[in-house]
């Protein structure tokens, strides 16, 4: 679109003329008429390994080289039309650069004075240009405590408005003509692309451009998804204020325009990523852009894996790079102001300057465990009063730093926690103190977030996405409050290898802009340990197999309405899959508890056949568990009495399992007795207690007897397993669990929660005999997980409602066969006695979370570590046998052990990578196997040692 100005009586109008192809050059009556109709360029080298199309809207082709030309001229013109502004008046505005230049150019032509309020981030080229245009510059030198430099600039604007005669505030932050300007900008994109656009990426600042684009799209092209690109350190989208060295991107105060309901998703980009995006676009496409445009390039790469095949994307690049020649394109400035830049990008022609040597650490995997490690590191740095600069490199596969994969903030709300709200708390229970008192418990944060009383949130279960928002919030606080000598580098990339370089560590990633990115660090915390691709040869041949369900909306999209589906696994992931295929498809649940019923949408599968090895669903959890008496049999004192010396290995089945059974039985009957007004004598020996229990059942024959064997394997007689028996088991389980703190079943199960910390100390680092260790991992760990870490009761009632609606069928629920028929159709079958059944299915979903097996099934990172010898498999050895758990060999401080038996003291594993060596590594636990604190302490000791030398 080309804007032409013409006079019609006493009013000025914009005439928008379609000029898709210009056959001849046109004459403009003023420089302001050349605003708009900027080119759209296809980027052929930016997409990485994808079939999507990417187009760049180059706003640098406006006369003063930025999109703010549109905004400035439109605001001024509307003010003139409304009689708010005339020749000789003074316009006052706060700006980091581009808006100021757009105003300066227009004001000069319109014979209007201009005062621009800036801060020290203003680059020299912009300052010189403003002076050349004749603008008056007012600079604020100190940021406000709340609002930063932007808040200080706005305060100065209000002061100047009071003291300057005939002044007008163009107010790019609140003038509705700002977003209205960009209805036209967006329209140009659609006209160039014939109305075909799937994604539009727009940078944030005042959010005028963002909301102008988003509102046009909502009205005219609602299927297009708007992706907002925000800065790390910006307060938009609930962010925490933090330092930002690249101007014009993000904001220190909330936007008056932003409406998050219009935005499909947002991505945070830091200063380093802005610079990397700028240099990548220059190298690959010969396009010189400013900081916010570089941020969009990096944001696109962060989001690229989530794009559908063939997606069309437009990137709104707001300005050119000429004004950044002394910053983003200046090597000295980059090294001084952008930590980690030397290892992250290479300027055209190579680096001419090298950075000073500084201490660097890395955390690989920024889910909760990585977040806990970061918190301990910052606290230890502050407590140790270290002053030299420290670089912290943070690696995560997506932009949900702090939340990680499990707690992504964009998950559907029906994906629930199995942890009660009050058990979630980032705050440590050990010294040193956190760096800030702004960290709060989850319940306190949730109370403020929802505007509800804390007491009403106790004993409740939140969605995983809400917990992710809390974790992300805590991450942003830690970054914002970190000691000034700490510099952060966020890498939204997958680490594929770690290698030794003398005393240093080299990290290699799949890069967003090059084939590989390499960073050198002194210390490293390793918290990611996901298994690799579990696709079997059968699954590779048949696309009806879905071997991982997250993110559910994308991974389960091949499942068509009214199809027949089999789901392998009956754990928490199964429930997520089931709800994604029903509630996530528009179905709804009405009523509560046993009265709940499911209303079909018509888009769900016709039938779902769940199955597992045991055929049993998980025991659900309630917020208020029964009061628990102290352990009587499986106590730390009893374990010490059994243990002969430090080399002693426990036999799980012979020594520990009998005590666990006794503890379960004791807890069950302690409450069962209380429920009928009687008391189980605590002082009795176990055999005497059993006699008292027999008398109890004679007196109360209707009371359900407890059987540990039945609890472990409710369907031991496979011939009696069918859909009816499975349904009956689920119904009876719900009845028992719904008793809450009066449920003897829950009382029995609660024993494992108290036993597990003691058992963890026994189990870890090969404390069981090799054979019994394998028996526990194979037969008992899944059982304890099924009964102790189930979903909230509400979600299990939803499963029961789906059963009653006829969507679930447990006919093949216990260890069926899955194979292909002659006509290549998937077939589910089982045999009971002389009878066999089979059914054809359309899709097979593996709803299990894979555990790492270093020898057979692990990610590229661990494959490379094993190949290079930096790790070796952990094996439990004793005189009679040995057992490979699948995990990596570690010291008791969590340090890696290489293939030669050497300890890698500057690499520590924490969380998932320690499974198989330690027990109970729940993602949200701060106390179990806390190698993060050990790592933080050792890293700081190394810093102190280096300083002394």
Image (cartoon, helix red, strand yellow):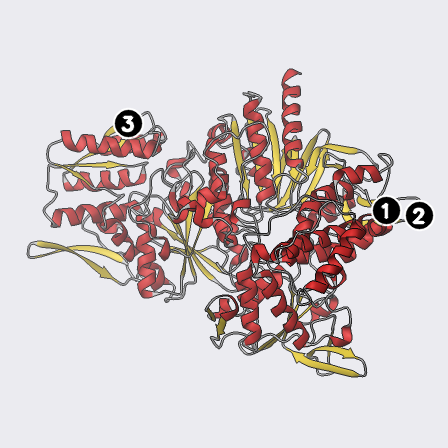
Quarter holding the N terminus is bottom left
Q: Nearer the viewer, residue 714 or 203?
A: 714
Whether residue 310 is visible here, answered yes or no, is yes
In this view, the mark in front (3 or 1):
1
Q: Nearer the viewer, residue 309 or 848?
A: 848
**Which quadrant holds residue 55?**
bottom left
Q: Residue furthest left?
A: 9
Q: CA distance from mark 2 to mark 1?
A: 9 Å
Marks 2/1 in contact by CB < 8 Å: the verdict is yes
- Judge left or right: residue 509 versus residue 98: right
Q: Residues within 10 Å of mark 2 (few under 14, many from 20)?
A: few
Q: Residues within 10 Å of mark 1 (few under 14, many from 20)?
A: many
The residue positioned 62% from the left and 54% from the top of the image is 674
The residue positioned 26% from the left and 50% from the top of the image is 35
Helix, strand or loop under label 1: loop
Q: Residues within 10 Å of mark 3 (few under 14, many from 20)?
A: some
Helix, strand or loop under label 3: strand
Q: Earlier in the sequence, mark 3 or mark 1?
A: 3
Give the residue number, with chain letter if any, for mark 2: 880
The residue positioned 53% from the left and 41% from the top of the image is 425
Helix, strand or loop under label 2: loop
The image position of residue 238, as x and y in percent, is: 40, 44
Give the residue number, with chain letter if any, for mark 1: 769
- Judge left or right: residue 302 versus residue 616: left
In this view, the mark in front (3 or 2):
2
**Residue 99 vertical position relative to residue 787 in the rendered view, above or below:** above
Give the residue number, with chain letter if any, for mark 3: 139
Marks 3/2 in contact by CB < 8 Å: the verdict is no
- Judge left or right: residue 203 versus residue 170: right
Q: Nearer the viewer, residue 336 or 729?
A: 729
The image position of residue 529, as x and y in percent, is: 68, 48
């Amino acid at each position: 679109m080309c804007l032409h100005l013409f006079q019609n009586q006493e009013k000025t109008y914009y005439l928008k003329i379609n000029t898709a192809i210009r056959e001849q050059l046109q004459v403009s009556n003023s420089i302001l008429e050349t605003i708009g109709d900027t080119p759209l360029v296809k980027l052929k080298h930016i997409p990485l390994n994808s079939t999507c199309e990417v187009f760049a809207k180059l706003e640098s082709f406006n006369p003063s080289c930025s999109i703010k030309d549109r905004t400035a001229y439109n605001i001024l013109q509307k003010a003139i039309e409304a009689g708010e502004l005339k020749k000789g008046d003074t316009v006052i505005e706060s700006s980091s650069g581009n808006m100021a230049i757009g105003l300066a150019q227009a004001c000069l032509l319109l014979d209007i004075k201009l005062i621009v309020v800036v801060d020290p981030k203003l680059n020299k080229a912009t300052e010189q240009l403003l002076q050349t245009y004749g603008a008056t510059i007012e600079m604020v030198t100190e940021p406000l405590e709340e609002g930063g430099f932007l808040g200080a600039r706005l305060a100065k604007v209000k002061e100047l408005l009071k003291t300057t005669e005939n002044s007008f505030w163009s107010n790019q932050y609140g003038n509705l003509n700002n977003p209205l300007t960009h209805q036209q900008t967006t329209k140009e994109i659609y006209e160039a692309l014939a109305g075909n656009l799937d994604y539009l990426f727009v940078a944030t600042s005042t959010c005028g451009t963002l909301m102008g684009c988003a509102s046009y799209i909502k009205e005219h092209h609602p299927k297009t998804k708007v992706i907002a690109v925000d800065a790390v350190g910006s307060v938009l989208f609930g962010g925490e204020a933090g330092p930002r060295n690249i101007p014009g991107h993000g904001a220190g105060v909330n936007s008056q325009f932003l409406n998050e309901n219009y935005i499909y998703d947002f991505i945070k980009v830091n200063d380093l990523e802005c610079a990397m995006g700028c240099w990548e676009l220059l190298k690959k496409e010969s396009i010189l852009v400013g900081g916010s445009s570089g941020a969009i390039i990096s944001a696109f790469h962060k989001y690229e894996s989530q794009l559908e095949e063939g997606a069309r994307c437009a990137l709104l690049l707001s300005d050119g790079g000429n004004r950044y020649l002394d910053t983003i394109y200046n090597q000295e400035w980059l090294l001084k102001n952008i930590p980690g830049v030397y290892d992250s990008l290479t300027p055209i022609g190579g680096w001419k300057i090298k950075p000073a040597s500084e201490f660097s650490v890395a955390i690989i995997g920024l889910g909760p465990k990585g977040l806990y490690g970061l918190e301990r590191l910052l606290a230890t740095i502050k407590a140790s009063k270290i002053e030299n600069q420290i670089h912290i490199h943070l690696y995560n596969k997506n932009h949900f730093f702090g939340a990680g994969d499990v707690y992504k903030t964009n998950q559907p709300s029906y994906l629930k926690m199995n942890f009660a709200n009050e058990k979630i708390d980032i705050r440590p229970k050990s010294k040193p103190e956190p760096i800030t008192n702004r960290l709060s418990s989850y319940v306190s944060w949730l109370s403020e977030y929802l505007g509800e009383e804390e007491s009403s949130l106790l004993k409740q279960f939140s969605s995983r996405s809400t917990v992710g928002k809390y974790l992300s919030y805590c991450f942003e606080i830690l970054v914002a409050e970190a000691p000034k000598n700490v510099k952060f580098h966020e890498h939204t990339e997958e680490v594929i290898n770690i290698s030794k370089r003398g005393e240093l560590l080299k990290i290699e990633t799949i890069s967003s802009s090059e084939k590989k990115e390499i960073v050198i660090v002194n210390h490293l915390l390793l918290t990611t340990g996901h298994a690799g691709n579990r696709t079997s040869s059968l699954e590779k041949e048949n696309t009806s197999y879905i071997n991982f369900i997250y993110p559910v909306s994308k991974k389960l999209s091949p499942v068509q309405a009214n199809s027949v589906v089999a789901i392998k696994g009956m754990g928490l992931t199964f429930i997520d899959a089931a709800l994604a295929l029903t509630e996530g498809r528009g179905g709804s649940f009405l009523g509560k508890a046993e009265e709940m019923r499911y209303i079909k949408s018509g888009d769900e599968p016709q039938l779902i056949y769940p199955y597992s090895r045991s055929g049993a669903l998980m025991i659900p959890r309630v917020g208020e568990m029964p009061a628990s008496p102290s352990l009587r049999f499986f106590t730390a004192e009893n374990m010490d009495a059994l243990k002969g010396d430090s080399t002693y290995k426990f036999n799980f089945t012979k020594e520990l399992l009998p005590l666990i059974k006794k503890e379960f039985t004791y807890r069950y009957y302690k409450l069962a007795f209380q429920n009928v007004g009687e008391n189980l004598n605590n002082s009795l020996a176990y055999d005497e207690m059993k006699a008292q229990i027999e008398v109890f059942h004679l007196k109360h024959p209707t009371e359900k007897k407890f059987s540990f064997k039945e609890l472990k394997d409710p369907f031991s007689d496979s011939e009696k397993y069918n859909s009816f028996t499975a349904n009956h088991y689920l119904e009876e389980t719900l009845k028992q669990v719904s008793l809450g703190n009066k449920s003897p079943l829950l009382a029995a199960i609660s024993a494992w929660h108290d036993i597990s910390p003691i058992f963890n100390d026994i189990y870890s680092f090969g404390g069981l005999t090799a054979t019994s260790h394998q028996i526990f991992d194979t037969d008992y760990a899944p059982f304890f997980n099924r009964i102790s870490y189930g979903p909230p009761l509400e979600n299990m009632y939803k499963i029961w409602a789906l059963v009653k609606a006829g969507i679930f069928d447990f006919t093949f629920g216990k260890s069926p066969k899955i194979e292909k028929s002659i006509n290549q159709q998937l077939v589910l079958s089982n045999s009971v006695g002389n009878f066999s059944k089979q059914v054809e299915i359309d899709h097979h979903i593996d709803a299990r979370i894979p555990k790492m097996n270093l020898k057979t099934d692990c990610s590229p990172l661990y494959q490379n570590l094993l190949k290079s010898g930096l790790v070796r498999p952990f094996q439990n050895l004793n005189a009679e046998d040995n057992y490979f758990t699948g995990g990596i060999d570690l010291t008791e401080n969590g340090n890696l052990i290489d293939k030669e038996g050497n300890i890698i003291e500057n690499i520590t594993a924490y969380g998932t990578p320690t499974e198989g060596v330690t027990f109970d590594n729940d993602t949200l636990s701060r106390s179990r196997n806390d190698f993060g604190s050990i790592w933080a302490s050792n890293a700081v000791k190394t810093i102190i040692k280096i300083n002394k030398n």
